[in-house]
Image (cartoon, helix red, strand yellow):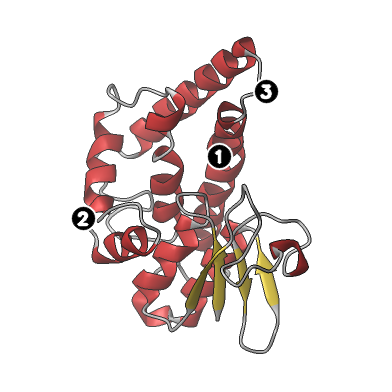
Amino acid sequence: MKLYYSPGACSLSPHIALEEAGLSYEAIAAPTKTHKLPDGSDYYAVNPLGYVPFLVLDDGTTLREGPAIVQYIADQVPAKNLAPANGSIARYKLQEWLTFIGTELHKNFSPLFSPATPDEMKTAARDKIAGRLKFVEGELAGKPYLMGDTFSVADPYLFTVTNWAALTGVDLSSYSNLLAFRARMAARPGVVAAMKAEGLIK
């Protein structure tokens, strides 16, 4: 299995999931700014869309989009309980979280990374993010993880996206439950391993 990633991008989420799963994989840097792979080849030849994450299975099958990839990873190791069983209401709740993070948080952070985004649009994006994080803050009350007491593949996605706050001027200081969640996540060996591999921490 090969995971194409860009350091610190949303691909950190499946990178963490792979570490948590204990699966054998190869991580290949595909920087979103250059689209040049370590061997000098063009990443667009691998993934025509040019973004990450992108997973290539041993048989050549490919998967893109983080929420699909992390569920695939979880389903390879059911004993690890990284995702509830398919068909259960809990699985749909996991998908609910993955969708929320992708559409309500991830996509609202995106314009904050672009120098071309007008300041008023950036302010509107930060306001939208603040409102969504207030909701997350309430949902994390009394719970160590998004799904309750059990870590799931939704947690690395939230951790990854909220990592971008410091880079984009989003203030997390008023979200004590979220900060506690982030500290809990940062201490997990799988998170540490993935972040070290991407050069995000020493």
Q: Quadrant of the C terminus?
A: bottom left
N-term mark: 1 or 3: 1
Mark 1 Cα shell of 10 Å, populated few (<14), some (14-19), many (≥20): many
Q: Position of residue 196 (x, y in %)?
A: 31, 61
* Residue for point 22% across, 45% down: 183
N-term mark: 3 or 2: 3
Q: Quadrant of the N terminus?
A: bottom right
Between the C-alphas of marks 1 and 2, the distance is 23 Å
Q: What amino acid is found at the position of numbered circle 1 in the picture?
A: His
Mark 2 Cα shell of 10 Å, populated few (<14), some (14-19), many (≥20): few
Between the C-alphas of marks 1 and 3, the distance is 18 Å
Q: Does 87 appear above or below 33?
A: below
Q: Which residue is mark 3?
A: 116
N-term mark: 1 or 2: 1
Q: Which residue is mark 2?
A: 187
SS under mark 1:
helix
Q: Which residue is mark 1?
A: 106
Judged from this view, the residue extending furthest toward the bottom is: 59
Q: What amino acid is found at the position of numbered circle 2 in the picture?
A: Ala
Mark 3 Cα shell of 10 Å, populated few (<14), some (14-19), many (≥20): few
